[in-house]
Amino acid sequence: MTAITAVPAADLTTGRKAAAQFFGDVWVLTKRSISRIKNEPETLSNVTIQPVMFVLMFTYVFGGAIGLGGAGGSYHSYLIGGMLGMSMAQTAPGTAVAVVSDMSTGLIDRFRSLPMSRAAVLTARTIADLLTQAIGAAVVALVGIAIGWRITTGVGDAMEAFALALLFGYAFTWAGVCLGMVLRSAEAAQQTGFIIFLPLTFISSAFVPTQSMPGWLQPVAEWNPMTSLAAACRSLFGNPNPATAVHAWPEQHPELAVVCWAVGMLVVFAPLAVRLYRNKGR
Amino acid sequence: MSTATSTATSESPAIEAEGLVKLYGNTRALDGLNLTVPAGTVYGLLGPNGAGKTTAVRVLATLIRPDAGHARVLGADVVDHAAQVRTTIGLTGQYAALDEYLSGRANLVMIGQLSRLTARAARKRADELLERFDLTKAASRAVKTYSGGMRRRLDLAASLIGHPAVLFLDEPTTGLDPGARALMWEIVRQLVADGTTLLLTTQYLDEADQLASRIAVIDTGRVIAEGTPAELKASIGGQRLLLTLADESDAAVAAEVLAPFATSPVLSPNGSSRLLEVPVAATDGLATEVVRVLDTAGVKVSDIAVRGASLDDVFLTLTGHAAEEKKAAAKKAKKKEEVPA
């Protein structure tokens, strides 16, 4: 029983031990978030029920009225790439809410008084959310297949598309963590998240080609990371992709654009989130 | 307890704070707080809401940085060597620091693992603590179904899981019913018997009296009195004699007759001259004696009572203002109510 507190502090700070400790702490805390999902599966509705509703509504309500320009092809084949992007980004407000809730309980004080890694609490949150995003991606793909969407390229291309979507989603999760760290209530996090999420999703090629928007709005949509992800997925799945006719750089190099956006967001938001956590209450 | 710390602390104090200052805007939550807690003792921080007790605990538990001053826990500075401090402390705050959706056992195992126990050791220690705190039956239920007393016990168990040498308990019994409170006291006594150093904050004098071997009374972020419970109570006059006179015109005579019993000036609470409050040292037959001298002086008494000194009395005596009155204006108003004996 004495072994634990008897470890000299100097040993704990040495690189390898610190790394092992970090991953150990992240694993323990990720399990915590996963068991929360097991106990209350309804918290997953935003990546299970919602995407199904959106795919069906867009396909059967709006789909007939939305033209894909010169690209041709069916709307439901076009839709899934955008829907994948939406299901990635829409978990970020949920992340912010979870972070606010955690911060407002005494539990975070306990974590901060323990000899554990400072970055582990937030990292575990993002890993748990990555798992829910993977579930969301699977749900979108399955409902897509049910309505006739098909991958016409190879397994490798399809895997690359899903990997890009999850990378994109992971970067958004860190933005959600930052949002949760700076806001004071779950309501504020929910509403602010929604205000950011809605234009991000709709002023993009997620549901309609950017060519159908007024000229002044087109550059905004073209440089929106959501547009890049949707275009990258459509191209990798072999789906109709009107973006190939747009000359803007992100539309011509959607895969690279997604990676740049994701890495850029991670470099900004992940250290910022950890810094906000460290200084909380000081 | 921890072998790593016991050798280092056999002579030096477990907790030392010098001139701690913590500002929140214009409020000085801590205003030059000094504290020395000997190893292996229960030390009580006594004060009203807003006195700075929780802020002091948060600084000592490395949760917040002081704006000035220094503090050491088992010799390690809470700012410069926070990581080391965290390996030796346990913290139980005012609000249960638990995951509501996890079971009691899952909470303890999680916190055990985060306190650097292996998964196996954490499970073993969790079961041990659940047994000890009478929570075995509820162990697999989600914490959100627990009663207030059960939560506090689980929370305390959580802060003990890593075998801390120094434990901070921030108002451990506030809001608990008398039964749960008594159980909590019992647990605290056991901890001390195990050799843990305990810093306990409380608003209740009787709690500090029951549990602590030394008490620091704090107000507006600084220590205003320090000593053993006996010293402290002696300094404020131990007990209070409360009298209701039949006729208010007897007040001056009564105050004069009672002066020899009083350990500090006779007070007239609420500005009413029918009511008299006399700080007294408790002795056998005190009430009989008081009634006899009042009767001899021709003063009729409608009601008489002796009660123990309360935190309010400590505050009134030490600061000249009541515990819950924090504003300067309120202080002045209170002072006027004191009538010299």
Image (cartoon, coloured by chain):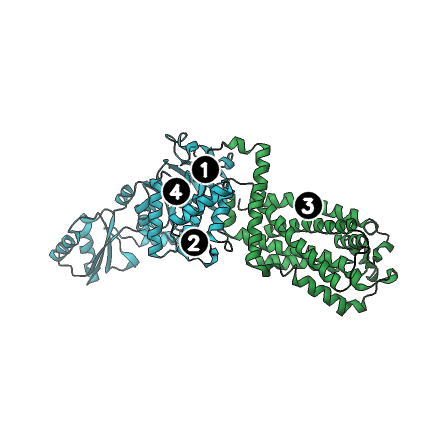
Q: Which residue is mark 4?
A: B199
Label 2 or label 4, whichever lies nearer to me, is 2
Mark 1: which amino acid? Answer: Thr
Q: Which residue is mark 3?
A: A266
Label 3 or label 4, whichever lies nearer to me, is 3
Left or right of B110 in this view: A201? right
Left or right of A107 in this view: B3? left
Query: Residue at coordinates 41% horizontally, 56% vertically from top-left?
Result: B148
Indicate the chain on which mark 1 is placed.
B
Q: Could you confirm whether marks 1 and 2 are on the same chain?
A: yes
Q: Quadrant of residue A96?
A: bottom right
Q: Which mark is residue B88?
A: 1
Other-residue count near label 4 (Cα within 10 Å), few / some / many at <14 / 14–19 / ≥20:
many
Q: Secondary structure at mark 2?
A: helix
Q: Quadrant of residue B276?
A: bottom left
Q: Which mark is residue B151?
A: 2
Mark 3: which amino acid? Answer: Leu
Q: Secondary structure at mark 4?
A: strand
Left or right of A82 in this view: B284? left
A244, A195: nearer the viewer: A244
Indicate the chain on which mark 3 is placed.
A
Question: Which chain did the image draw in cyan?
Answer: B
Res. B282 in view: yes
Mark 4: which amino acid? Answer: Leu
